[in-house]
Structures are given as structure tokens and as C-alpha cells.
Amino acid sequence: MFTKNDTFEQIMRTDPIRRAIGNLFPSCWLHRIPPQHAAYTMSQIEAEDTMEWGVPFQSDAFIESANLLMETADNHRFLFLPLWDPDNRDSQWIPDADTNCASTVSLFTGNPAIDNTAFAHTAQSSSVPPYPTNAVPAEKREALTERPAVIICPGGGYEMLSAHSEGIQLAQRMERDGGYKAFILSYRITPNTYPLPQMDLALAILHVRARAKLYQIDPARIFVVGSSAGGHLCASEAYLHETLKRDVLAELDRRQIQPDTRKSFQDCSARPDGIGLLYPVISFLSEYHEGSCLNLTNGAPDLRKLLSVETHITSTYPPVYAFANQDDGSVPVSNTTRLEKALQNAGIPHLCQVYPSGDHGIGLGYECSCKRWSEEMLAFFEQVS
């Protein structure tokens, strides 16, 4: 296992870290380490190099991501599931990072043949809340069968995926403290535009629901949780799911998948049973996040209305938990408040919370005023499922 005493170049020389680390830790963040620091230990790098937003380089997150990759490569404790090649049964498949095409769209999850809830069993202290967690009764958290499932969609403005703080840590928290079976979705980003990312999520829901017995989950309790643009992905897929399922099946037919696989997807719904949204992008009509809008729509005016979630909430929409911070300088908090109004008008069970401070992109946010949001979400999901 890697530690902060290892150098950056030692870690990056290890197969498959160099080619695959970007699946769990954004490759663009590695550029914060100058070439002359490659021989430094991760402790030294943390002391001397900073992230773009001014904090020390996230050595702990990088090391944890590298160790999870090694658990995948060496012990097969985790799996990358290739969604657009559903007949692929290679348990050792690890996609090349940053390829950003259908062939590398995947779900990262604990291997059900070895450790079905591996996120819970490899959780680091950074995902442990600074308060007692009791939103889900112990007997439900420890159940071996019929767990709820959660598909986690990291944010990144449809430009990158923040798969550690908005993926791995959420998966650890929900498996350990909520009794979930967690999956992290690597979906297509720019230059891929709508409907491709939404199709990736629709296929992920179909995959998990069709293989509920294998993953020991309840097919009627499949939740999606997304941050920022990942929240928009979840919220938009929920009202477009029927159209997206048709598109997914047509593409799978073109790929000539096995008939039994195709039928298993045909027999399932792509609608999530509940949605969790962290400081989400909701609207592309006013007070919106320009990067997410441009990256997903490529400037097409008709798509801006189609993909503005607040205009499409009806009585069939799933229950929603959402939170945002009043001082969010990236995605205006009005995205969440407008969503709340639409949910109220449609009579959808929901809990939308606005906290005073924390800004954007904070994941579990244990150091911020919103530190209890994940506890609130777990309790809400327990109530509505």
C-alpha cells in the first residue's frame, strides 16, 4: 500500500496507476505537481505544491485513489464494469483514463464475488462524519441482501469528473453508514454532448436493476446522487428516462449485444427511485452555470429548455433531497430554490436545504455549515423508500 513516504514518480511508475489513475483522481490535478518535484515524497509535495484553489495538494486523496486501483488490479476487490460492452465478463478490466468515449464508460464498485461492499471496508477516516450517525438503523446497515443501491455521479461541469471527493468518499459514507451498495459512474463529458452523458446514466440504472440479484440489492430502491453538473445529470435523466431507455436499447442493438442481456434491460425501468443533489446545476435558462450549459448543449438553444430541470417536474418525478450553500460562487443557489418550488407545485416528496456557507465542490463538507447534509439525505431516503 502506498503512503506519503512514497515519491510521486514511484507511485506513477506502478502499473496500472500511470494509465488509470484519472479514473479515480482527476488527471488535470496532477499538473499541479511540477516536473522537478516528481522525485519528492507525497508529504513533501503536500507541503510545497497547492491545488488551483489554494489549498495544499491533495496527497491523501491521490494516495487513496492509487491504493484502490491496486486493490482492483492485484486483489480484484473492486471492479470496473464496462457499460457499453455489457457482455464483457473480464473481471480484470481497467479502462484507460481520460479516453472519454463509450468504450470506457464504467461503473466502479466492490466485486460481489470477493467483497460486495468494498467501499465500506476500505473507508478512510476522511469519510467518517464528526458526529454520531444513526439515520439508518444498524440492522438495515448490516443486511447482507436486499440493500438499496446508489449510483454516484461526480461533478465537474461536464468537463472533468471529481471522482474522489464527490465519488469515493460518498460511496464510503453511504455503504458504511447507510447500508447501500455503491457504484461510481464514469460518464462521458465534453466534447460529448446531450444525450450521451444522460444515456450513460440511464444504462447504469438498467444495468444495476437488471443484475439486482448478483449485487444483492433491492431493484425497487435504486438511488442516484450527483454533485454540481453530476446533479444535473441525475435530475435530468429522471424525467427523460423513457426516451433515454429507447436510445440506449437502440445503441445496444447496433452493438449486437447478446439477446438475453438485451431482454434483461428491456424488462427494466431506467427511472431512479430517489435522487440526491449536492449544490446542483438545475437550470440553463437563467442564473445558470455557463460551463455546464455550453459543454452539454454546445450552445443549441432548444436544448437549454429541454435540459432545464425545473420546467419538467411532474407528479411522476422521484423523491428528491437537495442542498446548496448560500455563498456558492459557482452555481447560484437559486438553482436549488427554483427546484424546490417546482417540486412543491408537483407534490413531490422532497427536502431541499440551503446552508449559509461552504461555497461549491465540497463533497461531504464536514468542515462547513452543511456538515450534516449527508445525514439528512440518508434519513430522507430512509423515509421515502
Image (cartoon, rainbow, N blue to C red):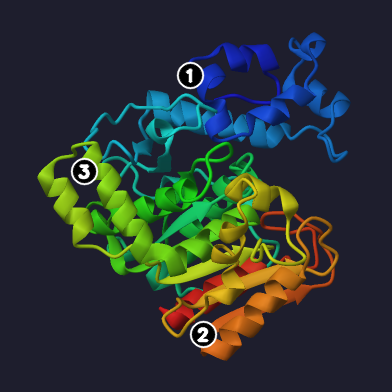
For label 3, the residue is 253
Q: Amino acid at mark 3?
A: Asp
Foreground: disc 3 or disc 2: 3
Rendering quarter of residue 158:
top right
* Outermost residue toward the left in this view: 259
Residue at 40% x, 35% y is 102
For label 1, the residue is 16
Q: CA distance from mark 3 to mark 2?
A: 36 Å
In the structure shown, which secondary structural element does the residue marked by tag 2 occupy? loop
First reached walking from the N terminus: tag 3 or tag 2: 3
Q: CA distance from mark 1 to mark 2?
A: 44 Å
For label 2, the residue is 349
Give the position of the N terminus as an image quadrant: top right
First reached walking from the N terminus: tag 1 or tag 2: 1
Residue 254 versus residue 343 in the image, above or below: above
First reached walking from the N terminus: tag 3 or tag 1: 1
Q: Amino acid at mark 2?
A: Pro
Q: CA distance from mark 3 to mark 1?
A: 32 Å
In the structure shown, which secondary structural element does the residue marked by tag 3 occupy? helix
Residue 124 versus residue 11 in the image, above or below: below
Residue 313 versus residue 266 in the image, above or below: below
Residue 291 - label? none
Q: Nearer the viewer, residue 379 or 193?
A: 193
Residue at 20% x, 58% y is 266
Q: Amino acid at mark 1?
A: Pro
Percent across and percent down for residue 47 are: 86, 27
Q: Is residue 142 visible?
A: no
Q: Residues within 10 Å of mark 3 (few under 14, many from 20)?
A: few
For residue 197, side relative to residue 113 (left or right): right
Percent across and percent down for residue 297 are: 59, 50
